[in-house]
Amino acid sequence: MRIEYDRDTCIGMFQCVAEWDGFERDEDAGKAVLVDGEETDEDVFVREVPAEAEFDAKFAARVCPVDAIAVYDDDGEQLIP
């Protein structure tokens, strides 16, 4: 499973940070940071999600109020949002 995070869309509510330690606060920018995320496009970060963290990563995506986080299964099918 992989997670994709659009930092430009993020409005800094940090709900994802509360749900999964794969996200951290960047108080200076007022945005979340995807830990170990690789920038694949401008302000779009992607990383693989470890099997033991899949539930928390999915929940982090579900609680994002602006859908800045997408989750894809191993076949590339979008699961969330």
Image: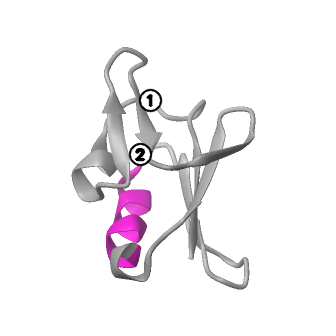
Q: Quadrant of the N terminus?
A: bottom right
Does residue 48 appear to the left or right of 31 in the view shown? right
Residue type beneath disc 2: Pro
The chief SS type of the magenta part is helix
Disc nearest the viewer among 1 and 2: 1
- The amino acid type found where label 1 is placed reads Ile
> What's the magenta region?
54-64
Q: CA distance from mark 1 to mark 2?
A: 8 Å
Residue 6 figure quarter: top right
Q: Nearer the viewer, residue 62 or 32?
A: 32
**Residue 32 to residue 61: above or below:** above
**Residue 59 numbered tag:** none
Crowding at mark 2 (Cα within 10 Å: few <14, some 14-19, many 20+): some
Q: Residue furthest right?
A: 41
What SS does tag 1 mark? loop
Q: Are marks 1 and 2 in contact (CB under 8 Å)?
A: yes
- 58 magenta-colored: yes
Residue at 37 percent of width and 55 percent of height: 22
Q: Which dot marks residue 11?
A: 1
Mark 1 neighbour class, 10 Å CA radius: few under 14, some 14 to 19, many 20 or more: some
Q: Residue 65, labelled with which disc?
A: 2
> Is 29 drawn above or below residue 34 in the view shown?
above
Q: Furthest-front residue in view? A: 36
Q: Residue at x 29, y 55 (%)?
A: 21
Tell me which numbered mark, 1 or 2, is placed earlier along the sequence: 1
Q: On the rendered structure, is 70 left or right of 35?
A: right
Is residue 41 one of those drawn in magenta? no
